Image (cartoon, coloured by chain):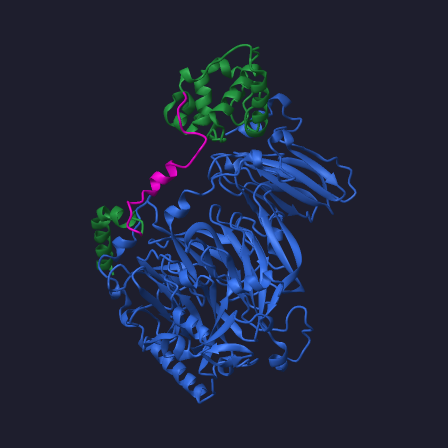
Amino acid sequence: MNRQITWVLSLLASVVFVLTACISKTPSHKEPLDTQELTKNQKEEHGTEVKAEDIHLTNPLNAQWVAEGKGIYDVKCSACHKLTSEKLVGPGWKGVTQRRKPEWIINMITNVDMMLEKDPQAQRLLEECLVRMPNQNLNSDEARKVLEFQRSNDGEK
Amino acid sequence: MYPSSNVFRTLAIAATAVAGLFSCKPKGAESSVSGNAAAKVYVAPGKYDEFYNIVSGGFNGQIGIYGLPSGRLFRIVPVFTQSAENGYGYSEETKPMLNTSHGFVPWDDLHHIALSRTNGNHDGRWAFANGNNTPRIARVDLSTFRTSEIIEIPNSAGNHSSPFITENSEYVVAGTRFSIPLDNQNGDVPITSYKQNFKGTISFIGINPKSGEMNLTFQIRTPGVDFDLARAGKGKSHDWVFFSCYNSEKANTLLEVNASAKDKDFIMAVNWKKAEEYLKSGKAKKESVKYAHNMYDESKHMATSTMMNEVAVLDLADCPDMVYFIPCPKSPHGCDTDPSGEYIVGSGKLAAVITVFSFTKIQQAIANKNYDGNYDGIPVLKYDAVLHGEVQKPGLGPLHTEFDDKGNAYTSFFVSSEIVKWRISDLKVLDRVPTYYSIGHLCVPGGPTNKPWGKYVIAYNKITKDRYLPTGPELTQSAQLYSIDGDKMKLLLDFPTIGEPHYAEAIPADLLFKKQRKIYKIEENTNPYVAKGEGETKVERKGNEVHVYMTAIRSHFTPDNIEGVKLGDLVFFHVTNLEQDWDVPHGFAVKGSANAEILIMPGETQTLKWIPDRVGIVPMYCTDFCSALHQEMQGYVRVSPAGSNVALTWNTGKNGPQTPVGDSSKKVAKK
């Protein structure tokens, strides 16, 4: 029995290299199938980093964006974020537009995996809250409207 | 078709078979695995399988989703059976899926899978499956792996010959296993009046090419035989479906002997294009029946069940040139068409040969009226005139045949417990491998399509005996994977299956991979009890019904404190999962709940009904680990006596008066 196990183990070890070729081919012998790559190609509403120059803040605030941003907040954000400075699951939003740069906020909404991987402030918040900020499937336009609503919540006109 | 001393022959074969079962068991089965088998089935951690294997669960009424070549089980899709694991058939939204003309039937026996096709090839849209016991056909959406639709089949008893699919998914078929007095006849007749009163039916269920929605387009009334299996034609035989039949003796008792009396039973060839013409020209009679049609709406996240009351029936007497009988030896089981559509393989369970018919010859015989009499008025084609040939001495107990992309066929043999590979053109046996033990169905990826993918054949076995660690009297069910790349079939892997595996199909991973749905968009949720955001959460009383519009997000419910529920109330928890990220379901359970928990996918609303049975404080919590604070995702319902005047109140985040109100956030956010 032991001999068998050793045999299987050494076999497994020796074949790891051959495997990719064995497994990733489509049965019709087309190009190798890279299924890992396939997931990346799926359309998702997050994943690209937003830079400072991508965001333009203007005054007066865009009233329609503020209203639409509030609508999104009610459905997708309010369960965890209060509009006061009080922490619920995540931090309260009062003052957030003064504490954080606009691109930080947008990336936190649309690109949270990157932020939790790279951004020290985001990482510190995770240590505090212990719940990962979820991806709530907002596109960057929607995130921009939420930002407009946050600015309004912080008293901007 | 003349009785002979067949009973004795049958018994003799059976006796040999029993002996054969043991003598066929190869000594040292493990040594039959070749040296590099492990390499061929090993899928490294983090890597994906090459095929999805969609496997019927038999008497568990479910479908198992496995990966090939690893044999790993990914998912159980509940179809005809309630699933306490995720609430299917328990939640208020999904209960109507299991409605039938007999009422709520939460179990069935699921035997066969048919994947949707375009131009004869897999298109990766839907999987159809039959409910054998209370005749039904289900459609599973392959982007969600959920049951989208179930249609009941009237005038049927034992929906076994189902749900085989035509080349362009025009129809799935349903042949009744048992002949019976039909639904609109008086069924209160002596069973011995079988020959007068019992009829068969086959149903053609149309598939909407866009939505997949099923519609019972028409039925054909047939003589009172038993329908076993079926396959649609391909290419040149596109317009036809072939059904295997047994019990042409019309026996109503001890079929084991009495339905094995004749040398030949039939394959019934049906020209469905012709049937469509008759239907169009008004030959069908509308008959009154009762059957349920259940649909799941993905935006409402709710199923509805509609009771239908009519079916269009074609009587063979009014429809000449539509149906023919082809004699086939000894109770044919499998009836499989090859990828070209030219050959129809009949596997007589008790026959010593595999019979292969030629579609071209069938057409010639029909044109020349080359008949061997008739059966209940239906022409019987001459055996020799339509025969391509017989595979001689292939094995014992042929059941099913699948095909590769090189002109070869693979037939399963239950009694001699083996797969036999043979060439269609010259009917030569090329190879045989033992299965462990007693194979039923088998599957080549794409085997029933116009272009099989080949590469593997999988055996679905009926007996496992000594193959796995034993678990008391009830042992695991099992499948075996063989490579068919080379001239010789090679055993690569045994893997256990859930329920009893009957038929299965395998489809390349990349056909399904890209289209998997990740979440339901909360904006598109039109469930009447949805709470889109915590602002819409509430508790409403309507008489003795209490409706809780509840949300779930990592990691709290809103509301999580509810008071004012009384004994005698029916409480409905309508839980909306506010998450919009893949793989973040929440669960919901309440103590004493007599049905199940529910799982709610991101953006979905599901409802658990709960009838409190005692006064007190009742806990509820999330059952699906969702975050570091999952264990904190919990709450209370206060149940008061009937007639109590405790007001209906609800909240999340307000601790009692001992805590300052402004400090409320700590309750939810604390570590």
Question: Relative to residue B15, is residue A6 depicted above or below?
Answer: above
Q: Is residue A93 left or right of residue B454?
A: right
Q: Is residue A56 visible?
A: yes
**Residue under the point 43% across and 79% down:** B382
**Residue under the point 61% across and 59% down:** B105
Q: Is residue B476 visible?
A: no
Quarter residue A107 falls in:
top left
| Prevalent SS, magenta region | loop
Question: Relative to residue B582, is residue B324 depicted above or below?
Answer: below
Taking the magenta stretch, the answer to whether it contains residue B349 is no
Could you tell me how many numbered marks the image carries?
A: 0
**Residue under the point 49% across and 40% down:** B625
Q: Colour of chain A?
A: green
Q: Name the residue nearer the viewer: B22 or B449.
A: B449
Quadrant of the image containing the N terminus of chain A: bottom left
Q: Colour of chain B?
A: blue
| Residue B427: x %, y % from top left | 30, 72
Quarter residue B352 falls in:
bottom left
| Residue B500: x %, y % from top left | 45, 63
Question: Relative to residue B6, is residue B461 depicted above or below?
Answer: above
Taking the magenta stretch, the answer to whether it contains residue A32 is yes
| Residue B515: x %, y % from top left | 44, 43
Extent of the magenta region: A28-50
Quadrant of the image containing the C terminus of chain A: top right
Q: Residue furthest bottom?
A: B5
Q: Name the residue nearer the viewer: B665 or A149.
A: A149
Q: Name the residue nearer the viewer: B567 or B301.
A: B301
Q: Is residue B79 left or right of residue B564?
A: left
| Residue B28: x %, y % from top left | 26, 69
